[in-house]
Image (tube, rainbow, N blue to C red):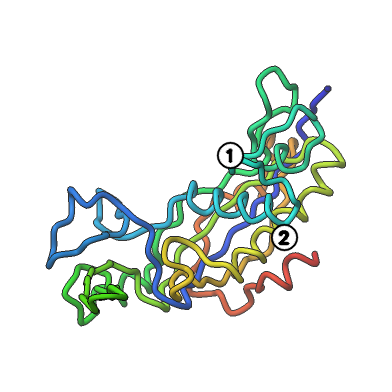
C-alpha cells in the first residue's frame, strides 16, 4: 500500500452542552461535599474539560454499531483489510497490516472564555460545576440509596478541534463517516448517565480548512489561519452539523 500525504482538513468549532454533562475524573483528588463521582478537570486550572479520547471513543463506538461491526465480545473493532473504513479513520488495524496512520485526530476540548466567566458566577456548592443528587430505591424494602454526581452545567461551551488527514480518494470519501459519527453523537450523548438525561450536546463549526502539503511547505496564509486562535465572539456565522456535513 503506497501512501502519499495530500492535505489535512481542519475542523474547528465548539461543543455546546444542552443538558448537564458528566465525564468522570479521579475521586481521590476531589472530596467536596460528599461527591460520589467527580468530573475530570485540568490540573493546571481546575476547569472541567472534555478529553479527546472520550469524544473520539464514543464516535467510534456509535459508528461500529451503525455499521454492524461490533464484535461478539464487545471489543474494539479491528481489521486486516487496509481499506477498512473504520480502521482508516479511527485506527486499530491488526498487527502487520499496512493500513497507514490513523486519519482522525481529536484534541482535548477546553472551555470557552464566556463559559469560564459563567462558571465563575455559578451559585453552586462546587467549583465551576453543579452537584446533582440521585436516588435508587430498593424495590422490596423501599430503602433509599442516595448518591451525588458532579456535572458541567448546561449552556457550557468547549472549544473543539479535529484534524482529518487525506492520503487518497478513499480518505476523501471516508470523511462522511466523521460527520455520521458526530450526528449519531448528537442524538446519543457524551459521558455518563445518558439514559437519565445527561450528556446531550450540539456541535457548531467554523468553515473547514484544507491545508495542503504546499501550505505546510510555504507557511501560507491558509496555514497561518489554521493555527491562529478562533475568535469565540464572532461565532454568529458558524455552521450547525447538518450544514457543514453537506459541504
Where is residue 109 shown, x and y percent of the image? 45, 56
Name the residue at 51% across, 48% down. 107
Where is residue 5 shown, x and y percent of the image? 76, 32
Residue 59 higher or lower than 138, as above or below = above
Q: Which label sits in the foreground, 2 or 1?
A: 1
Q: Secondary structure at mark 2?
A: helix
Instruction: Report the front residue among 53 and 77.
Output: 77
Name the residue at 55% across, 54% down. 58
Residue 135 visible? The answer is: no
Where is residue 176 shown, x and y percent of the image? 77, 56
Residue 46 visible? The answer is: yes
Instruction: Report the front residue among 53 and 237.
Output: 53
| Horizontal side, residue 235 vs residue 141: left or right | right
Instruction: Report the front residue among 105 and 94.
Output: 94
Q: Quadrant of residue 1?
A: top right
Residue 187 higher or lower than 48, as above or below = below
Where is residue 225 shown, x and y percent of the image? 61, 54
Instruction: Report the front residue among 140 and 166.
Output: 140
Which mark identifies residue 180? Answer: 2
Q: Quadrant of the C terminus?
A: bottom right
What residue sits right under mark 1 in the picture?
75
Name the residue at 22% across, 52% down. 27
Amino acid at each position: 500500500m503506497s501512501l502519499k500525504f495530500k492535505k489535512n482538513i481542519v475542523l474547528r468549532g465548539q461543543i455546546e452542552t444542552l443538558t448537564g454533562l458528566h465525564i468522570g475524573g479521579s475521586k481521590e483528588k476531589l472530596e467536596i461535599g460528599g461527591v460520589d463521582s467527580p468530573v475530570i478537570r485540568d490540573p493546571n486550572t481546575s476547569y472541567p474539560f472534555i478529553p479527546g479520547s472520550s469524544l473520539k471513543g464514543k464516535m467510534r463506538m456509535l459508528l461500529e454499531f451503525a455499521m454492524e461491526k461490533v464484535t461478539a465480545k464487545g471489543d474494539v473493532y479491528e481489521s486486516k483489510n487496509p481499506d477498512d473504513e473504520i480502521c482508516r479513520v479511527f485506527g486499530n488495524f491488526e498487527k502487520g497490516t499496512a493500513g497507514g496512520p490513523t486519519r482522525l485526530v481529536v484534541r482535548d476540548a477546553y472551555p470557552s472564555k464566556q463559559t469560564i466567566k459563567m462558571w465563575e458566577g455559578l451559585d453552586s456548592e462546587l467549583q465551576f460545576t453543579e452537584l446533582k443528587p440521585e436516588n435508587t430505591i430498593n424495590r422490596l424494602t423501599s430503602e433509599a440509596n442516595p448518591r451525588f454526581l458532579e456535572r458541567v452545567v448546561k449552556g457550557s461551551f468547549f472549544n473543539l478541534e479535529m484534524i482529518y488527514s487525506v492520503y487518497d480518494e478513499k480518505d476523501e470519501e471516508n470523511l462522511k463517516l466523521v460527520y455520521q459519527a458526530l450526528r449519531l453523537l448528537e442524538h446519543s450523548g457524551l459521558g455518563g448517565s445518558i439514559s437519565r438525561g445527561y450528556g446531550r450536546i450540539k456541535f457548531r463549526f467554523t468553515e473547514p480548512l484544507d491545508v495542503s502539503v504546499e501550505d505546510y511547505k510555504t507557511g501560507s496564509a491558509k496555514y497561518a489561519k489554521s493555527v491562529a486562535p478562533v475568535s469565540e465572539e464572532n461565532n454568529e456565522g458558524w455552521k450547525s452539523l447538518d450544514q457543514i456535513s453537506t459541504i
